[in-house]
Amino acid sequence: MMAKADILIRNAKVTTGALGAPAADWIAVAGSRIMALGYGDACAWIGARTRVIDGQGASLLPGLNDAHVHLFSGGLALTDLNLTGIRGAACLRDAVARYRAARPGLGFISAFGADYSLISDTTAPDRHDLDGVCPDVPFMIMAVDFHTAWANSAALALAGITRGADLPPGSKVVIDDAGEATGALVEFGAIDLMRRCNPASARHSAAAQRPLESPAVSVEDRAADKAVLRAAIQHCAELGLTAVQNMDGSLYQLELLSEIERDEGLAVRVRMPFQVQPGYGPHDLAHAVAWRHRFASDKLSCDFVKIFADGVVEGGTAYMLADYAHKPGHRGAPLIADAELQALVVEADRLGFQVAVHCVGDGAVRQVLDAFAAARAANGWRTARHRIEHVEMIDPADLPRFAELGVVASLQPCHVPARGEGYLDLIGSARGRYAFASADLRAAGAAVVLSSDWPIAPLEPMATLHAALTREAWPSGGPDHRISLAVALDGITRAAGWVAFDEADRGALAPGALADLTLLDRDLAGVFPEGLPAVCARLTICDGQITHDSDVVASSVRQTEEV
């Protein structure tokens, strides 16, 4: 007797993601795998227990995969004050007042998404600006890039840093001429001094600074932190994501995710790195080996290494080959010296790890490409799929090295400033030609994967697609960086699975592949490209299990309203 499907989706526009595959309008799922897909009559796959879903002519895609997110920060952002689009002291005051009115009794206010010109086009915020808005409660604002924060006087006093702090190179509590903290906190070492004072982020911040430790926390605090991660994961599923690559690597977060998986299951697949901290050496990668063995389930893995090479352009901490346009004599600096970086990368590569490195400046990109070249020279050729995250600036001489070394360019379309506004003032118009040079990277043969970097940018996959498809030209010139819908979809499906070494099971729809599927609420071809931001996930299936069903949610809402 012919086996029957557990789930059959029919009357859909199936995008298989498989090169040369014929058209399909139905797909049958049994257990955790795809049984079959085809075109036309699918009745033979329907049994007494089959759940049949009418796709209503909407796009059915390989499960969406975000290759660069920050789950815990994203989970916190779901309830923190979102300042995206807020400009001026009056608008900030109104936003804070509304937020506080809805949450009486808050003892610490955390906000995110703020532009560097939040208060003024000429100066960044300081503690006096924040005191004028919120004088009585500790208040911290994260810049849109999460590499700079601003705190009010109450928050600075709470953290004990009103006169600054002794921090490793690359991070600083900014001090004025009188020796007082201005309220600006640059890079993670300084920012975490404040985040550890916020009860909601305290343990996450501590874990980020001491990732090898599993902190002793109360049952209640551990439950609260799991609730943040659970909310983040469910938010991913609701947006159609079946997998994410979480760029925060700490033992505490891995343990929390492992407990969620054990007790109730994970709604998305989560891949995490071992994150290198300042002062780490090659011997510390023994912990990465242990984590790789310990966390290796179908839904949770820890099988790559993450390194920060520099900061961000807006904060002046990106490592550049030439001076910043607005700061003659300043180029930023690498966070790790060349010899130390190469020793780490060579050892990680020898141990069989993929290495992902945050590089924004063209100096950092070159430094890291040199480290990947050193790893190949030391260890020989292999398909390591090492990654450079962001690649905001690149020298044209380094473009062909991506393909030569097999390095993946991990890009975030939503990071690109519209028409280069503000950004060109920092780097100079001449260098704008090779800023966010996605078309140049593709032309040079680089493998490219797309992602969001949530919560720094919106998690919505359709926002990522829309930004990639509609990118505007910059006055500095250069090629047309817009890409087709097919190429953009590949960047958040097949390529995102491939960069995680999962191409045999995920990223394309074919018999025998894992049943990771995303059914949208309409046909993408019918809204391309202007209507993309309004497209939603109607149904998300991960490992053959329905993790989000908007029909059920809508039905529940209607029943509640009727009561």
Image: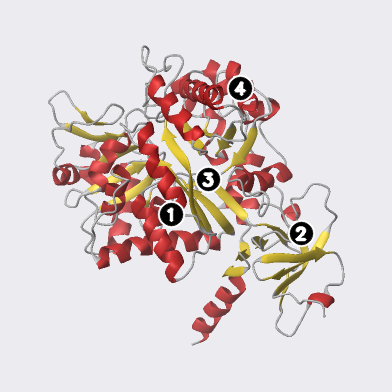
In the rendered image of this protein, does residue 485 appear above or below residue 238?
Answer: above
Residue density around tag 1, few if under 14, some if 14–19, many if 20 or more, within 10 Å: few
* 421 or 521, nearer to the observer: 521
Tell me the amino acid under the disc marked 1.
Answer: Arg
Which residue, given by chain and number where applicable, does mark 2 sit on? Answer: 14
Give the mark toward the camera: 4 or 2. Answer: 4
Dot 4 or dot 1, earlier in sequence: 1
Give the mark toward the camera: 1 or 2. Answer: 1
Which residue, given by chain and number where applicable, does mark 1 sit on? Answer: 294
Which residue, given by chain and number where applicable, does mark 4 sit on? Answer: 401
- Residue positioned 52% across, 86% down in the render: 562
Which residue, given by chain and number where applicable, does mark 3 sit on? Answer: 452
**Real-space CA distance between mark 4 and mark 1, rounded to the nearest whole angstrom:** 35 Å
* 550 or 189, nearer to the observer: 189
In the rendered image of this protein, does residue 42 appear above or below residue 487?
Answer: below
**Real-space CA distance between mark 4 and mark 2, rounded to the nearest whole angstrom:** 36 Å
